[in-house]
Image (spheres, rainbow, N blue to C red):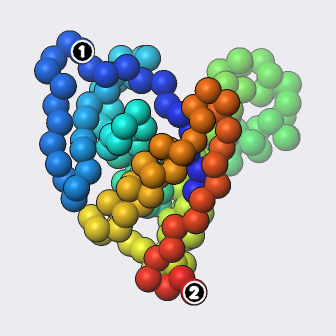
């Protein structure tokens, strides 16, 4: 797994909400776009909980396959018609991103299952704690990705 620094400021509009869940400190932060994100926090490291509970656990919403197929087919078979509407190109790019996110989510969950982990609270906590531990060792200024290995019940 990889962790990158995230750009978020603590939510200063309301009192910072903090609680303990499976020995994790949970805080709310405001992302640059204004969205409130629940994160596990250790020192200066933040791990967005939804990224683990949804993306890493294979629960990312599936992209509209039929629409994707139709737009790709239109682009290949009738390029003139496809290019005539700029919405086609932008929508196809959006669908490609959704497809990539869905496939990446499925790949991550397969990797997690291979080592014997599940989406149980204890396993989610273990993954988040591992990411927090790695994050404390990462140099956020250099934006270097730090590969790490988390062993599950089936690891050798």
Q: CA distance from mark 2 to mark 1?
A: 45 Å
Sequence-wise first label, 2 or 1: 1
Residue drawn at the location 45% of the way across and 52% of the way down? 133
The image quadrant of residue 87 is top right
Q: Is residue 100 left or right of residue 155?
A: right
Residue 146 in picture, x, y percent from top left: 63, 49
Q: Is residue 140 left or right of residue 90?
A: left
Residue closest to the eye, 35 or 46: 46
Q: Is residue 77 in view from this perspective?
A: yes
Residue drawn at the location 53% of the way across and 34% of the way down? 5
The N terminus appears in which quarter of the rendering? bottom right
Q: Could you tell me which secondary element the residue under label 1 belongs to?
A: loop
Residue closest to the eye, 58 or 152: 152
Q: Is residue 112 left or right of residue 68?
A: left
Residue 93 in picture, x, y percent from top left: 68, 32
Mark 1 surroundings: few (<14), some (14-19) or many (≥20) residues within 10 A: few
Residue drawn at the location 24% of the way across and 41% of the way down? 26
Residue closest to the eye, 143 or 65: 143
Q: Which residue is mark 1?
A: 12
Residue closest to the eye, 35 or 140: 140
Residue 105 is tagged as none
Residue 37 in picture, x, y percent from top left: 33, 32
Mark 2 surroundings: few (<14), some (14-19) or many (≥20) residues within 10 A: few
Q: Which residue is mark 2?
A: 156
Total marks drawn?
2
Pick out the residue farthest to the top: 13
| Vertical arrangement, residue 92 with respect to residue 10, above or below | below
Q: Is residue 69 left or right of residue 131?
A: right
The C terminus appears in which quarter of the rendering? bottom right
Residue 88 in picture, x, y percent from top left: 68, 27
Q: Could you tell me which secondary element the residue under label 2 belongs to?
A: loop
Q: Is residue 91 in view from this perspective?
A: no
């Amino acid at each position: 797994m990889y962790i990158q620094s995230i750009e978020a400021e603590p939510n200063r509009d309301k009192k910072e909400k903090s609680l303990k869940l499976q020995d994790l400190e949970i805080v709310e932060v405001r992302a640059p776009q204004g969205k409130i994100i629940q994160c596990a926090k250790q020192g200066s490291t933040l791990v967005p909980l939804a990224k683990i509970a949804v993306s890493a656990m294979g629960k990312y919403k599936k992209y509209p396959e039929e629409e994707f197929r139709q737009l790709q087919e239109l682009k290949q078979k009738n390029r003139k018609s496809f290019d005539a509407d700029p919405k086609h190109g932008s929508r196809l790019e959006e669908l490609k991103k959704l497809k990539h996110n869905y496939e990446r989510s499925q790949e991550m969950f397969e990797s997690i299952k291979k080592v014997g982990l599940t989406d149980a609270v204890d396993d989610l906590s273990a993954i988040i704690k591992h990411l927090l531990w790695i994050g404390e060792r990462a140099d956020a200024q250099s934006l270097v990705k730090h590969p790490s290995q988390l062993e599950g019940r089936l690891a050798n």
